[in-house]
Amino acid sequence: MNDVSSRDALGAFVPGSEIRIQGASAGPLKGVTLAVKDLYDISGQRTGAGNLDYLAEQKPATRNAWAVQALLDAGAVVVGRTITVEMALGMSGDNIHYGMPKNPAAPDRVPGGSSCGSASAVAGGAAELALGSDTGGSVRIPGSYCGIYGLRPTHGRIPLDGVVPLSPSFDTVGHFTRDAELFERAGRVLLRETAAPPAARRLLWAEDAFAHGEPATVAAITPLAEKIASRIGRMEKARMCPGSLEEWAQDFRTLMAREAWQIHGGWIETKKPRFGADVAQRFAIASRITDADAAAAKPRRTAITRHLTELLADGTVLVQPTSPGPAPLKSSPPAVIEEARYHAHALCCAAGLAGLPQITIPAGTVDGAPVGLSLLAAPGGDTMLLRLARDVAS
């Protein structure tokens, strides 16, 4: 379990990662404190991916991950390495080796995963900015659960050099902040974008996605959706998926799990690392997915990508709940936690399958716990979403 230091009352940081790496003396992020998920290489340190057996086999990194270096070059100051769910395969935030970071916005609830430590550090004020990663919702869900901003960028837009992979065709670099202006500023650094963002022209209310939201959550986030609509000037109701989001989610799970086993299966079978029961179960399921299963899902993914790219053309933004409801209680049985993960996949799978950018914005509370509103755009629409988030925060 995590021997939380006095510096880390949140339990957000990997024990022993009390580091301070000064960034450039000038830049758009000068002096901004940065926490780094334990998937990213930091020069001179070993990257553990949330697992002590994996950590034991690693040598110190010889250079920083691309994203870490980009933020340092912009003036950020690294203040620590944050806990991730083991191998980034989980949505609750629990880790058998280090424990579960605190959800500062709702201490009796889970923080969300797998970027649990990064979300906790930002929400609790231990860092102004944090790097996470998002494969199936690992920035968006913790962002929603902890009441902060989070970006899953267009797939491939931000280099993944120096990041432990899970499922390469879904993996993305993501970041968290509490502040909308910093959210945009850091995002533009990571996206290497200096041009003015395009304006959003149309807003779609995703009826099928909102159908996955709990009624109290829909009620809590609707005022922000209406505020965004007033800024854009136009909102229409539409379905995101011609069929069912559950079918899309199953294709996502098949393809993601197959890639995860191809990446880590050999090591798992040879080394038999210690995993928590939930992570071990997910890898066991992944081991049984065949090439034929993945081959059957790939054409559907191509069709999904084409459909969503067309739906979101010409400056269209889609609005939906980030998660079906607030974070589950920490006292919830494992089956309840797993059910929440499956429902979250229905809301997170579209961006992953089609490589879309998606942001989560703090939008309200349910039973005292945060819930987020998500905005999606066509590939390349990242800065449009970042600017929209900043504008509606004012």
Image (spheres, rainbow, N blue to C red):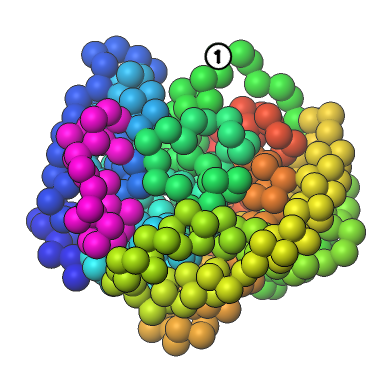
61 part of magenta stretch: yes
Residue at position x 23%, y 30% in the image = 62
**Place of residue 100 in the rendered image (x, y in percent of width and height, measured from the top left):** 30, 67
Task: Where is residue 371? Give x, y as percent.
Answer: 55, 61
In the depicted structure, whether residue 30 falls above or below residue 341: above
The answer to whether residue 359 is above or below residue 48 is above
Residue at 81% from the left image edge and 39% from the top image edge: 309
> In the orientation shown, which residue stands out farthest toward the left?
6
Residue situated in front as seen by the camera: 196 or 351: 351
x and y percentages locating residue 74 in the rendered image: 35, 19
Indicate left or right for 265 with 344 as reference.
left
What is the chief secondary structure element of the magenta stretch? loop
Magenta stretch, residue numbers: 41-64
Which quarter of the rendered picture does the N terminus lie within?
A: bottom left
Q: Quadrant of residue 64?
A: top left
Q: Position of residue 67 (x, y in %)?
A: 40, 31
* Image quadrant assignment for residue 106: bottom left
Q: How many other residues sit within 10 Å of disc 1, few (<14), some (14-19) or many (≥20)?
A: few
* Residue type beneath disc 1: Thr
Residue shown at the point (81%, 55%) measured from the top left: 300
Say if 150 sits above or below 330 in the image: above
Label 1, secondary structure: give it: loop
In the rendered image, which residue does mark 1 sit on? 194
